[in-house]
Amino acid sequence: MNKKYTVSDFFCGCGGFSEGFYQAGFDVVFSLDNWKLAKETHDINHPNCNCLHMNILDIELEDFDKLIPDTDVIIGSPPCVSFSNSNNSGNANKDLGLALIKQFLKIVLYKKTKINSKLKYWIMENVPNSIKFLKEKYTAEELGLDSNLPDLEIPIKEILTASDYGSPQGRKRAIVGDFVMPKVTHSNNPVFIKDIFKMLGPPINNKNTKIKDMLFDFEINKSHLTDHFYESTIPKCICDKARQLKEDHGYMGKMQFPDTTNRLSRTIMATEAYASRESMIFKSEYNNGFRAPTIREISSLMGFPINYQFKGSHNNKHKQIGNAVQRCMCSII
């Protein structure tokens, strides 16, 4: 890419999508999210980006130009709760999710069809189940725009697997929009959990003096690594409950306890609950028990650089990371 394209990021959260485009050489100049804490995290990592704390549904048509700059690329990751299979077995009400998507598409069509438009690409990310609720094209009228405008076509609807692009996860995501499809980079050499753990070193009794980020090829002093060096042992009573839920579940199938590291990571959940089937629990390196992954470990498993900083409490940092778009999904243009 010879020109440094500008990017607007809607539903930016703590900045997973923004960071991916930033690392790929784009200039992320505008972002928006409804969660103030996530916006604050985005701010400290992308200080040159104008990040608004507001609900996208509150932006009126007459304010599209006032609040939203014209950029070369528009990206967005609407909240996926409505479409997730884990929400009421995929039967949750879709009204809010569809309203958020339609507002995003309304902004895209408005920016795409305005005089002297500079919009070249747009991308929307969500859970795979969302694709079945998206049309092939939307008329301007149904998006709330002048009916004389052309339809907004969605030429690409694909399910991508994160590990194919260098992520340590096998997470599948729907990518839709108008963009250049990325080339698979890691089909034969995936990054495993053990690679991330080795990169960071153990949370306790870590002998490293430098930490090198294998995903981004840079190095920092161990003293500058945050959210990693703390005790994360899980009490035995909680481990026993998690083991039971993982191993004694005939309908859903048996799961590993503890999780092995010679594999891709499972999906990082936004909720940090260890007495659950979805929890990630590892054998401890420093005692005979089991431990939770650190905030830094899950952020690296999600593709964030090791110097990315998160605002808020431990639980809120976990939620921000679990809700984020994986950095490795962003090498698209």
Image (cartoon, rainbow, N blue to C red):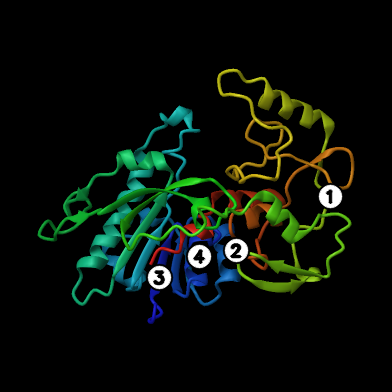
Please say if the residues under marks 4 and 3 sit with CB atoms less than 8 Å apart. no
Residue 51 vs residue 150, the one in the foreground:
150
Label 4 and label 3: CA atoms lie apart by 11 Å
Disc 2 marks which amino acid? Thr
- The quadrant of the picture occupied by the C terminus is bottom left
* Label 1 SS: loop
Q: Which residue is mark 1?
A: 231
Q: Quadrant of residue 292?
A: top right
Disc 3 marks which amino acid? Val
Which one is in front in this view, the residue at disc 2 or the one at disc 4?
A: 4
Which one is in front in this view, the residue at disc 4 or the one at disc 3?
A: 4
Q: Which residue is mark 2?
A: 41
Image: 111 above or below 286: below
Q: Which residue is mark 4?
A: 20
Badge number at residue 7: 3
Horizontal relation, residue 121 to residue 171: left or right: left
Please say if the residues under marks 3 and 2 sit with CB atoms less than 8 Å apart. no
* Label 2 SS: helix
